Amino acid sequence: MSHIEGTGAAPEGALPTGIVTVTEVLQDLAFTGDDAPARAQRLRVTVAVAAAVRAAVDWLVGEPGERRALILSADDTVLELTCDSPAREGIAFAAEVLESVDGNIGPSPSRPGAWVVRAPVVAERQSYLLLEQGAIGLAVPWTAVARVRLFPTEAIDAMARRHHATVLAPFTAEAPGAGEHPVALIGLGLRRAVLVADRLVWRRPAEPAEPAEPSPASGLTRLVRTDDGELYWVVDVRTLLHALPVPPIPQPEPRPTHPAPRVPAPAPRPAAPPRSSAPRPQLFELRREDVEPMGEPEEEKAAGPEATAAELAPPVAEAIAGSTVDEPSALASEPAAAPIAAPAPAVEPARPIEPARASAGAPAPIQARRALVAEDSITARMFLSRQLEQLGFEVRGVARASDLRAEVQRGPWALVFVDVELPDTHGAEVLKDLVARHSTIPTVALIRDVQDAEVARAAGVPHALRKPFEREALERLLTRIGLRPGRP
């Protein structure tokens, strides 16, 4: 845990007028987090944001002597502070001051009882969650994005009710379609809204651009341009959410208790029968249907894994020349996405699969093909896994090289996808090991840029798939490998 004291002065070199470090904002407060002190010193915020964040935090952490610790995390455009068991009477006041600077606050998706503050930081380039509704490209400021998931059409209303969120009307007149669609839960203060799209592009930085035509819909007032030249209309979160009702602050959930299962008292032991040479009669036969498993009632199944700020890292927009990489097609050349449908949970297909071996010399039937995906980004993993499932594969997803090595031994696998950079081992080592030990299994490197492609080639991996993953690129790859995509 770090404890910042003193003035928290900025490092050598004066900061621009009206900008301070997060160290100055959090001085005299205790906090934890990966590389937290250095991160707090690097991050800059405007004076207005600094004042709002400090006021919000003071409301949440309580009085001196009883203050809750903070967990600091951040990326290039968002400051995120998590407070365990905040002072409930301060949440509404914290939300009000955060709303004034386009920040938001809400329950943590991963820490029961904790609340998360998100506020913008000063950055050379702002990041956006890029989506498509019909022919309209949308850019949601990353500060406003609380969660990203896939949801089926029929589940969107229930999900919105759980989060006390309003489902935003689409910006396009096209009728919504069925199936699974990316959904962003966006926030302003305590207010929440659900934005449903046809297609998730990715999280990317973008620059302001001059519009050459009028806005296609209310709430879309300016344009941004990505590194690859694509234009997206920025979703005006303040305009769309400011008029929404403030949802009630949920009551803290009591810790679940699991009482010990009641065990019936043993029946009195019958008196021993007199010894006899005749065979003993069988008193009862234990049948499977007579035995009821003990356990807790099945909880409501979660809609699926979520993506957070750390999960949607912006890919590098570089062409990879002279490689066997399957890249996403340019948006301009892609067919129009299916009409907007309801959100479907971001899927984490990490279910154990029973091995299904094919007879020697015969290709495995499509329903028996199994794919292994090793990718530490939950968002990338869930999208690739979902696409593979839709193409007839059974998929197992892992996030670490150690898990990958263990799963490979549990084959057979028709195909293995490996991120070039896994958290516990450099991707080159994993790829070389797979090629050396399991040369009969087609291996595909998951890459972001030219450097990743070179790492894969040096490791002896002939196939690569570039992020963000596109259905067409995946199908081309499977065809080239000899695994024709399709359903049985």
Image: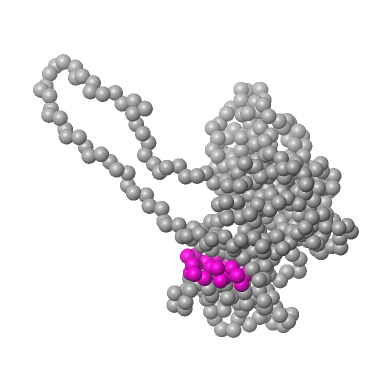
Nearest the viewer among 202 and 418 is 202
For this view, does 268 lie left or right of residue 72?
Answer: left
Occupied quadrant, residue 368? top right
What is the quadrant of residue 312 in the picture?
bottom right
Placement of 180 over or under 241, stated as above or below: above
Residue at image position (47%, 45%) is: 299
Q: Whole-percent x and y of residue 291?
A: 34, 31
Residue 415 image point, x, y percent: 66, 36
Q: Magenta span covers which residues?
A: 78-98
Q: Is residue 80 magenta?
A: yes
Question: Relative to 129, is 444 above or below?
Answer: above
Q: Name the residue nearer the viewer: 407 or 50.
A: 50
Q: Is residue 247 above or below residue 131?
A: below
Q: Residue furthest left?
A: 274
Q: Quadrant of residue 4?
A: bottom right
Position of residue 349 measured from the top left corner of the image (x, y, whole percent) = 59, 41
Question: Looking at the image, how many numbered discs can be counted on the residues?
Answer: 0
Pick the residue in front: 210 or 19: 210
- Whether residue 155 is visible to the viewer of this picture, yes or no, is yes
From what the image shows, is residue 191 above or below residue 59? above
x 62%, y 46%: residue: 156
> Is 144 contained in the magenta span?
no
Residue visible at 36% across and 27% down in the picture: 289
Q: Is 335 on the left-hand or right-hand side of 19? A: right
Q: How is the image coloured?
A: one colour
